[in-house]
């Protein structure tokens, strides 16, 4: 019996009353690649943060090399040979790649940091790991997201870790870069390193992982060496996939076009055209960083197109600001509720009524009763679980926060909804409710542009899916019969060919 | 030999060293350009009004007038780099200037020892700020606004009336009225900055200004670094107080008050980002020169001193807008 390289035993962790992990356990041994899979919000990232020393668990124990450890910080984990690439990268943006790679171990000359040698060593390090295209002199801020991810991986691997934790390391990488990463992982495995990683891409998990532990709702539900995807999904979601998604409304092919883009171009956006009809859910998919964000920002007036036209209900529009887009009946629900949508310290009432303040005022003074009524309407119609409308939005769970944000825009009686990865970090039950809401909204005649990083979601909810790659619409897939695999393969097709 | 599949890319196009140096130090390049423009404008105005070229006297007095601000700007920069702000710079200058007036009157040995002691007072002031910010977890702006008033109060208590008489040797070294000796402080500040930038502390100051959380996950102590940055800032403010005393040959417990704001102005002109993590002490030094030159220019342009601040404000706004626009153009051309 070999001693496990790393072990998590009954880890529990709650954030402000919301449990992220309840009783999470798993074991990984030396020379093994171990995948942690589960839905967003299943607790994988929290577990990685705990094992990497970033977050302290409330209960349970982490054992490294058979010894129970109490990690005071990432530094403590480093001393035990455990290095982590967190999902939120930890590079310093306004410092160079070289300074980042050799932070705290810069070569010295006469007691001072030798900048020339730092550059030289960084260059050698990048060469050793086969990533010579990254310039050590460049500021981190100026390199692409994939390059940053690569640098972060090189930094962790350069310490010859005994245990390597990678949280969603491939989310911003394209095929070739994923192959490179897997090459590094195989090399480390041969050297007896224990690699624990999370991923949402089933094909990748199958190709590299020796064992898979599945998480659901903050708990592990089993460890497998061989499991097919359907079974894994069933374990992850706790229900059959079909039951998670409501039935789609019929495709509204004859309905009037609510919004039409013709050859929209801009930063990371090239010649994007589409027509969005009343009652339609038009999906947008593809890998991160391939222009969805820019598309949504442009359509919402938050970024300016350099070419092409956008028309709303037949009239050509040039939105100079989100305010102008909102006035045309467009609403955006962003992925990052915390920084882009909600005022966390303000009440549910304030947040719910923010977009319709004009309607709720008389002579510029807010009518409190009307405001309460509007907020209560949001809470009731969307089944927001809150102790009251006076409660700060920050105290609600992620899914309920998302509902408040959705409700805010529904109160404006907008016609066109832009939903940008709205189910990210939301638990499965709330996801289900959001799906039902999306379908109901489409039935009611809303036109919905729906981006999701989850291909499964797109396949089950959308009438059509535009798959974006490098700022271009690479494929248009039409339901029924679209699968998540179709979407993913359309998103990566070119990189496979390369 | 690495496996073939472990090579992602053999090499790629790289920009030249110069191109990197320029775009990464665009703030420094801009402030140098601004300073050259100011010097030229100043010379033209001087020739038009005085019918001769500015000479050694003008150079000496400009240098002596700038050094206190240069150190104040350096103090501000050290703190701003950590994503903080030090409003107590003026108070530390008041306090150290007042102590200088009371103590600097003996021979060279006593003067040297007291000078060191005064630098220590600056460090203590910075320590107080740093501890309140880093360990007390209070907002830098609140902490230093409070300590500004406290330091000002102590200064006025110990030196109610302007007074004292600086020993000639002290004045001769720090603010020699006859020869532009202060020129040597420019390379000295430059060298000290270059050294600071190459120490672990220097790297740590920049790192926590970039992203305190990321820095700490690589073993950098945010608390220790913050406290040391405020302490070094306090020492630099004390230097400003000493140079000011030397230039005025006496002490005044209110002389530093204006430096709180002008130190921020000089740092910003020098390309130091108020969001932390970006900028350089060298930039702040040049920023101080620009700030003083603008006052000189306004003087020779016969602007009523009453309206001086009005024009200074206009200039600052124009400079910041121009720097922003040029910076964005350079970034976009990448």
Image (spheres, coloured by chain):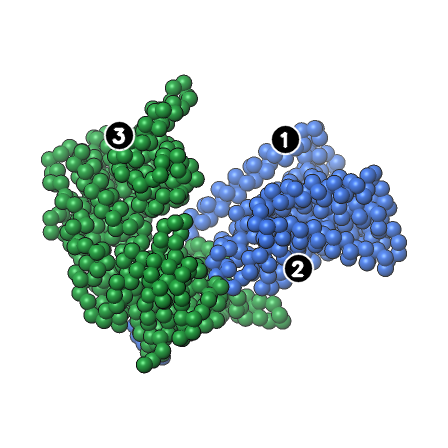
Chain colours: A green, B blue
**Residue A310 image point, x, y percent:** 26, 36
| Residue at the bottom extreme of this rendering | A1
**Residue that label 3 marks:** A413
Are callouts 1 and 2 both on one chain? yes
User: Left of B205 or right of it: where is B158?
Assistant: right
Instruction: Find numbered disc 2 in the image and state the secondary structure of the residue it sits on.
Output: helix
**Residue A284 image point, x, y percent:** 23, 47
Residue at the location (36% across, 70% down)?
Answer: A7
**Residue that label 1 marks:** B310
Q: Chain of mark 3?
A: A
Residue at the location (58% across, 47% down)?
Answer: B138
A16, A483: nearer the viewer: A16
Q: Chain of mark 1?
A: B
Looking at the rendered image, the quarter that the N terminus of chain B falls into is bottom left
Closer to the camera: disc 3 or disc 1? Answer: 3
A67, A207: nearer the viewer: A67
| Residue at the top extreme of this rendering | A363
Instruction: Find numbered disc 1 in the image and state the secondary structure of the residue it sits on.
Output: helix
Q: Please rate how many residues cluster around mark 1, counting C-alpha atoms within 10 Å: few if below 14, some from 14 to 19, many from 20.
A: few
Determine whether B309 is above or below B289 in the image: above
Are callouts 3 and 1 both on one chain? no
Q: Please rate how many residues cluster around mark 2, counting C-alpha atoms within 10 Å: few if below 14, some from 14 to 19, many from 20.
A: some
- State the CA–CA distance, disc 3 to disc 1: 49 Å
- State the CA–CA distance, disc 2 to disc 3: 62 Å
**Residue that label 2 marks:** B192
Q: Which mark is residue B199?
A: none
User: Left of A96 or right of it: where is A292?
Assistant: left
Which label's residue is closer to the chain start, 1 or 2? 2
């Amino acid at each position: 019996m070999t001693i496990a390289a790393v072990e998590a035993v009954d880890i529990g962790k709650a954030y402000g009353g919301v449990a992220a992990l309840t009783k999470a356990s798993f074991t990984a041994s030396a020379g093994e690649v171990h995948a942690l899979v589960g839905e967003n919000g299943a607790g994988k990232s929290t577990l990685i943060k705990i094992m990497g020393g970033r977050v302290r668990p409330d209960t349970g124990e982490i054992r490294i090399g058979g010894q129970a450890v109490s990690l005071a910080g990432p530094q403590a984990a480093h001393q035990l040979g455990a290095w982590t690439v967190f999902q939120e990268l930890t590079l310093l943006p306004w410092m160079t790649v070289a300074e980042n790679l050799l932070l705290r171990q810069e070569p010295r000359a006469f007691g001072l940091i030798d900048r020339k040698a730092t550059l030289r060593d960084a260059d050698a390090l990048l060469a050793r790991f086969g990533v010579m295209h990254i310039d050590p002199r460049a500021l981190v801020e100026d390199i692409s997201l994939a390059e940053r991810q690569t640098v972060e991986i090189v930094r962790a691997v350069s310490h010859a870790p005994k245990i390597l934790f990678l949280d969603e390391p491939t989310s911003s990488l394209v095929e070739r870069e994923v192959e490179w990463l897997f090459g590094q992982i195989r090399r480390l495995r041969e050297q007896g390193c224990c690699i624990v990683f999370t991923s949402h891409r089933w094909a990748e998990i199958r190709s590299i992982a020796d064992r898979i532990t599945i998480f659901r709702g903050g708990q592990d539900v089993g460890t497998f060496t061989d499991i097919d995807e359907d079974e894994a999904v069933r374990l992850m979601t706790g229900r059959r996939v079909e039951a998670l998604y409501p039935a789609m409304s019929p495709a509204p092919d004859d309905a009037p076009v609510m919004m039409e883009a013709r050859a929209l171009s801009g930063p990371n956006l090239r010649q994007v055209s589409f027509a969005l009809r009343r009652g339609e859910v038009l999906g947008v998919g593809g890998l991160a960083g391939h222009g969805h964000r820019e598309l949504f920002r442009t359509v919402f007036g938050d970024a300016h197109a350099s070419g092409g036209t956008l028309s709303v209900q037949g009239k050509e529009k040039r939105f100079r600001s989100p305010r102008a887009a909102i006035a045309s009946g467009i609403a955006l629900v962003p992925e990052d509720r915390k920084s882009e949508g909600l005022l966390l310290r303000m009440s549910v009432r304030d947040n719910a009524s923010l977009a319709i303040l004009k309607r709720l005022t008389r002579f510029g003074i807010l009518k409190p009763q009307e405001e309460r009524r509007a907020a209560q309407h949001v809470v009731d119609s969307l089944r927001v679980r809150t102790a009251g409308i006076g409660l700060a939005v920050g105290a609600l769970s992620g899914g309920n926060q998302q509902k408040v944000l959705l409700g805010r825009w529904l109160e404006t009686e907008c016609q066109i909804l832009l939903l940008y990865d709205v189910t990210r970090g939301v638990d499965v039950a709330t996801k289900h409710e959001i799906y039902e809401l999306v379908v109901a909204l489409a039935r009611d005649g809303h036109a919905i542009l729906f981006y999701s990083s989850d291909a499964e979601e797109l396949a089950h909810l959308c009438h059509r899916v535009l798959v974006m790659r490098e700022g271009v619409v690479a494929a248009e897939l039409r339901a029924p019969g679209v699968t998540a695999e179709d979407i993913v393969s359309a998103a990566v097709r070119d990189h496979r060919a390369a | 030999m690495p496996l073939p599949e472990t090579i992602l890319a053999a090499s790629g196009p790289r920009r030249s060293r110069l191109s990197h140096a320029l775009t990464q130090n665009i703030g420094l390049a801009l402030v140098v350009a601004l300073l050259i423009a100011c010097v030229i404008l100043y010379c033209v105005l001087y020739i038009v009004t005085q019918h001769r070229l500015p000479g050694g006297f003008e150079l000496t007095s400009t240098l002596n007038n700038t050094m206190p601000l240069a150190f104040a700007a350096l103090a501000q920069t050290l703190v701003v780099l950590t994503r903080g702000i030090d409003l107590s710079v003026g108070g530390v200058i008041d306090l150290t200037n007042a102590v200088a007036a009371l103590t600097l009157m003996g021979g060279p040995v006593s003067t040297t020892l007291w000078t060191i002691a005064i630098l220590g007072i600056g460090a203590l002031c910075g320590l107080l700020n740093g501890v309140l910010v880093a360990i007390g977890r209070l907002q830098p702006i609140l902490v230093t606004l409070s300590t500004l008033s406290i330091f000002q109060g102590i200064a006025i208590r110990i030196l109610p009336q302007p007074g004292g008489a600086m020993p000639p040797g002290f004045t001769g070294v720090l603010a020699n009225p006859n020869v532009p000796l202060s020129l040597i402080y420019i390379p000295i500040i430059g060298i000290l900055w270059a050294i600071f930038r190459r120490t672990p502390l220097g790297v740590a100051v920049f790192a926590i200004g970039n992203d305190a959380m990321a820095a700490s996950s690589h073993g950098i102590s945010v608390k220790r670094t913050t406290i040391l940055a405020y302490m070094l800032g306090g020492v630099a403010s004390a230097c400003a107080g000493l140079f000011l005393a030397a230039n005025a040959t006496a002490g005044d417990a209110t002389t530093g008050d204006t430096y709180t704001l002008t130190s921020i102005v000089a740092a910003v002109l020098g390309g130091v980002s108020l969001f932390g993590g970006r900028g350089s002490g060298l930039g702040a030094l040049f920023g101080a020169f620009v700030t003083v030159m603008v006052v000189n220019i306004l003087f020779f342009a016969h602007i009523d001193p009453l309206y001086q601040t009005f024009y200074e404000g206009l200039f600052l706004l124009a400079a910041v807008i121009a720097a922003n626009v040029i910076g964005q153009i350079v970034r976009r051309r990448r």
